[in-house]
Amino acid sequence: MSSDSKRDVLGCDRGPWVIVALGANLGNAVGTLVAAADALSSHAAGPLLRSPLYQTTPVDCPPGSPLFVNAVVAFHPSEGLTPELLLDAAQGLERQAGRRPKVLVNEARPLDVDLIDWGGEVRETPRLILPHPRAHLRRFVLAPLADLFPTYHLLGMDRTVAEVLKTLPEDRAFRRLGASPGLEKPWLVVRPQ
C-alpha cells in the first residue's frame, strides 16, 4: 500500500492515513500507551488501527535508561484536523502523562508521541517535520508499522516498510509483548484484510 492511496485497507475512501508512533519507558508504560491511543481515537474519522506492543531498547538515550514499550497507531483524520493541530494534541497528551521539559536529550519519559506520516504530506517547519526524518532508521517504529501495513511506503523510500525493516540492526531486547493483565481496555490489534 502506498502512502498516496485514496482507498484504505477496508475499501473506504476516507483520505490519508495518519501514522503515529507511541513510546514510554517510565511508569505504567502499557497503560499509558492504551490511554494515549484511546485519546487519539477522538481525532479519527473511523476506526483506529493499533499495532501490537513491543519492548525495545532505548535508542540514543542516556546510559541506564529503562526499556521502552512502543506501538504504532494509524487512522484517517477527522474533518478539519491538520498535522499542526494533531501535534498540539500529542504534546498535550505527553504533558498529561507527566512529561516535563527535557533536561537531557532522549531522557526517560512517561510518553512520547511522534507524528510519522500524514498520507505523504511534506512539512518542514521549526515545530514539525513530515514525514518523520528518522522513522526509517527505527526498528521500534517500522516493526509495529509493518504489522499494520507491511507494503506501506514512507515518502522518499523506494522500499516497503517491511523491506526497510529487514535492513535494520538487531535489538536484543526487542520482543512483541503478550496480553497485559489488569488493563481496563485491552490493547486491540486490528489487522487490515
Image (tube, grey):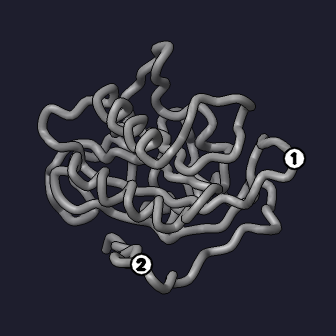
Determine the residue positioned at 15% across, 58% down. 12
Per the model, the C-alpha gap separating discs 2 and 1 is 30 Å
Report which residue position mark 1 lands on: 63
The residue under label 1 is which amino acid type?
Pro
Sooner in the amino-acid sequence: mark 2 or mark 1: 1
The residue under label 2 is which amino acid type?
Leu
Report which residue position mark 2 lands on: 183
The percent coordinates of residue 88 (x first, y second) are 35, 30
Looking at the image, is 26 positioned above or below residue 106? Answer: below
Q: Secondary structure at mark 2?
A: loop
The percent coordinates of residue 124 (x first, y second) are 47, 17
Q: In the drawing, does residue 147 fall left or right of residue 64? A: left
Label 1 packing within 10 angstroms: few (<14), some (14-19), many (20+): few
* Residue nearest the viewer, comparing 83 with 103: 103
Q: Quadrant of residue 170?
A: bottom right
Determine the residue positioned at 18% across, 62% down. 11
The percent coordinates of residue 182 (x first, y second) are 45, 83
